[in-house]
Image (tube, rainbow, N blue to C red):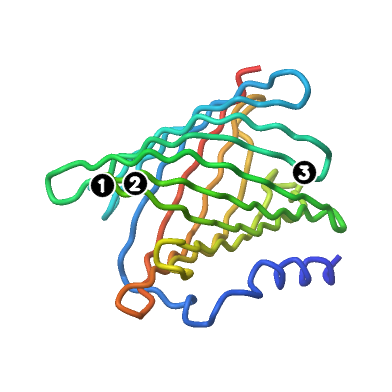
């Protein structure tokens, strides 16, 4: 068991440069809410708004995402979704229109759930269109029965085709726990690193997610 956990953690962090592990003092809070409805043939439809704040209360970003997920096999799923984004710049709010396609591969190794999600985004912002590729590798450890929580770790990199380079990276660590038969929650710490002026700048993020299954 210890060996499988170690292998899983290595998979999550193997592509992360050491410079990503240091962040400045900036803190943000993200609040994510998701309602999903199970349809037939392993198809799920969902709606998910999210709000992001600087210094906990200063909201600078919001989006709402609608998506359709199809679990083709036990080890592969496809998701098509659309995200409508509002980002504040000074006193103005800018909009972004973002259709996206996701392909997720899944595998279980000694009760550890491994996944790799590949995402292609088409970003429409102020008459400027661009593509971005995101790849997220996750490892969910076995549920701790006594506490009813499921720890997880993940790493995600962002490749921007417009600048032809990886210019963002996120490292995740968190726990998932039930709040009832249909409700669940995830609390996470995220270290986000952004490439600016040829140097990496870090942001500390506390993310709270709440999930509800309508069925």
- Give the quadrant of the C terminus: top right
Q: Residues within 10 Å of mark 2 (few under 14, many from 20)?
A: many
- Give coordinates of residue 185: x percent, y percent: 56, 39
Neighbour class for label 3 at 10 Å: few (<14), some, many (≥20)? some
The part of the image, by quadrant, that contains residue 28 is bottom left
Mark nearer the N terminus (3 vs 2): 2
In which quadrant of the rendered view does residue 46 lie? top right
Q: Earlier in the sequence, mark 1 or mark 2?
A: 2
Q: Is residue 92 left or right of residue 78?
A: left
Query: x, y percentage for residue 204?
Result: 39, 63
* Residue 203: image location, x then y, percent: 37, 65
Q: Secondary structure at mark 3?
A: strand
Find residue 33 and report its horizontal and vertical position in percent. 47, 34
Name the residue beneath numbered marker 2.
Answer: 52
* 109 left or right of 67 in image: right
Asked whether the beta carbons under mark 1 and mark 2 sit within 8 Å of each other, the answer is yes
Which residue lies under the disc numbered 3? 76
Question: Which comes sooner in the sequence, label 1 or label 3?
Answer: 1
Q: Mark 1 or mark 3: which is in front?
A: 3
Q: Is residue 154 above or below residue 81?
A: below
Q: Residue at x 81, y 52 (%)?
A: 107
Q: Nearer the viewer, residue 143 or 136?
A: 136
The 10 Å Cα crowd at callout 1, few under 14, some 14 to 19, many 20 or more, is: some
Q: CA distance from mark 1 to mark 2?
A: 6 Å
Q: Residue at x 61, y 57 (%)?
A: 136
Asked which secondary structure carries label 1, the reply is: strand
Location of mark 1 (residue): 60
């Amino acid at each position: 068991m210890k060996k499988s956990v170690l292998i899983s953690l290595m998979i999550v962090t193997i592509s992360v440069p050491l410079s990503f592990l240091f962040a400045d003092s900036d803190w943000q809070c993200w609040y994510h809410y998701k309602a999903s409805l199970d349809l037939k043939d392993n198809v799920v439809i969902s709606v998910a708004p999210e709000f992001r704040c600087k210094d906990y209360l200063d909201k600078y970003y919001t989006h709402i995402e609608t998506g359709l997920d199809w679990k083709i096999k036990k080890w592969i799923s496809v998701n098509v979704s659309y995200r409508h984004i509002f980002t504040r710049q000074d006193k103005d709010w800018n909009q972004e229109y973002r259709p996206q396609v996701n392909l997720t591969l899944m595998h279980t190794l000694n009760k550890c759930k491994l996944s790799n999600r590949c995402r292609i985004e088409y970003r429409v912002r102020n008459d400027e269109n661009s593509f971005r590729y995101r790849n997220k590798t996750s490892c969910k450890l076995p549920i701790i029965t006594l506490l009813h929580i499921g720890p997880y770790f993940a790493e995600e990199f962002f490749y921007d085709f417009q600048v032809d380079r990886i210019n963002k990276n996120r490292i995740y660590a968190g726990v998932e726990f039930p709040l009832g038969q249909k409700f669940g929650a995830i609390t996470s710490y995220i270290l986000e690193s952004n490439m600016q002026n040829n140097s990496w700048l870090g942001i500390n993020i506390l993310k709270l997610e709440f999930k509800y299954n309508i069925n």
